[in-house]
Image (spheres, grey):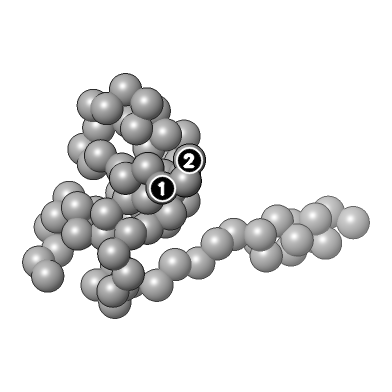
Amino acid sequence: MQKSQNQSHQNKRKTFPPLETITRPNLTTDEAAFYCNRKPQTLRIWAMKENGLIRPIRQNGRLAWPTKEVKRVNGIDE
């Protein structure tokens, strides 16, 4: 029983492509958090307090994190 629970937990992990290959203008909070090595809630706090490394764009009540800024923070040139 324990083994099947571990397998289902592993299947829930999200996978993301390398940041260098992303061409979309914005990332989701989960994606940006992954690439910044932070938890999604940390980025939500940055958005709320407006004091984080990156400032999001608010689109229809959702947060969109500029890919260009996430790449800058990670030292990736475009």
Query: How dense is the environment of label 1, judged by Cα within 10 Å: few (below 14), some, or many (20 and up)?
Result: few
* Residue for point 24% across, 72% down: 20
In the image, which disc is placed on residue 7?
A: none
Frontmost residue, 72 versus 9: 72
- To which residue does mark 1 refer? 59
Question: Residues under labels 1 and 2: Cα distance?
Answer: 5 Å
Confirm whether residue 42 shows in the render.
Answer: no
Image quarter of the N terminus: bottom right
Q: Residues within 10 Å of mark 2 (few under 14, many from 20)?
A: few
Q: Count the marks: how many?
A: 2
Q: Secondary structure at mark 2?
A: loop
Mark 1 in CB contact with mark 2 (< 8 angstroms): yes
Q: Quadrant of the C terminus?
A: bottom left
Asked whether the viewer can see residue 17, the reply is yes
Closer to us: 35 or 6: 35
Residue at the top extreme of this rendering: 49
Amino acid type, callout 1 = Gln
Q: Is residue 26 left or right of residue 6?
A: left
From the viewer's perspective, tell me whether residue 21 is left or right of residue 72.
Answer: right
- Residue pictured at 26% horizontal, 59% vertical: 67
| Local secondary structure at mark 1 | strand
| Residue 15 at x, y percent in the picture | 50, 67
Give the x, y percent position of residue 16: 44, 67
Residue labelled with disc 2: 61
Residue type, numbered disc 2: Gly
Is 36 placed above or below 21 here?
above
Query: In the image, is residue 48 above or below residue 73?
Result: above
- 42 horizontally vs 53: left or right: right
Q: Which residue is at a point 46% across and 51% down the rendered structure image?
A: 30
